[in-house]
Amino acid sequence: MGGVGGAILDLDGVLADTEHLWEESWRACAGDAWDPAYTGAMQGMSAPEWASYLAVRVGAEAGEVRHRCVAYVVGQIDAGRGPLLPGARDLVTALAAHVPLGLASSAARPVIDRILTDNGLADLFAATVSSEEVARGKPAPDVYAEAVRRVGFTGDGLAFEDSGNGIRAAAAAGLRVIAIPNPQYPPAADALALAWHVATDHADARARALSLLS
């Protein structure tokens, strides 16, 4: 691998323990129309995409679905749920000491800003991108490609992802993916096969990344 010019991280499931909050919000919006299969389909979608997907299936208006779900997640974060995952802060600070960082998340912008600001991490990122700010959500590469563009690094890039659609998106954007699988929502084998390294935890991911940066 050539010189690493930067690193792009996902948010939900990589930095913050928030994947389950999105599922809770979707279930609440769907009510009796909820199907557990919806979670796997919607993970990685941008907010407009999952709002439209869910609205069609529950007979609601997409804008209202998005508003209710995002408000629920922000409220839960404010209530102390959705903390940083163990080792996430150390991963970010270690990477930031070596290369510029970007964030490429499917989360809506209010959630991204709330988590990074509340945890004192916002200043460590050169750029953050929500997939609602690009044409297509994950597994399309758009959000990662835009994060790389905004950060402006040259050379090879690392990406840190937990979900199957996220791994696919980062790999499609040409990044070297370090997967940190979420045991609650494990990536499919074909997605994991795209990762350069499948980490056992954040400490393992940090060590493997630093082996390239030191």
Image (tube, rainbow, N blue to C red):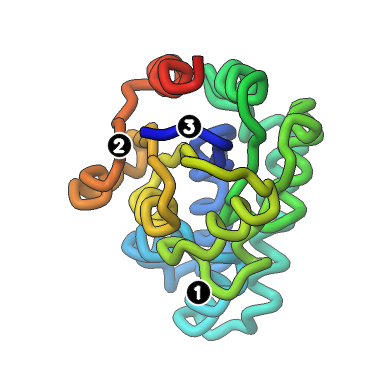
Q: Residues within 10 Å of mark 3 (few under 14, many from 20)?
A: few
Residue identifier under label 1: 54
Tell us which disc is closer to us: 2 or 3.
3
Indicate which disc residue 3 carries. 3
CA distance separating discs 2 and 3:
16 Å
Q: Position of residue 105 (x, y in %)?
A: 58, 51
Give the residue displayed 60% in from the left and 51% down from the top. Answer: 148
Residue identifier under label 2: 196
- Where is 178 relative to 206, above or below? below
CA distance separating discs 1 and 2:
33 Å
Give the residue displayed 41% in from the left and 34% down from the top. Answer: 2
Quadrant of the rendered structure where residue 16 is? top right
Name which of mark 1 and mark 2 comes first in the sequence.
Answer: 1
Quarter in which the N terminus is drawn: top left
- Where is 57 relative to 76, above or below? below
Give the residue displayed 52% in from the left and 72% down from the top. Answer: 136
Instruction: Using residue 188 as the reference point, say whether residue 29 is left or right of it.
Output: right
What's the amino acid at mark 2?
Trp
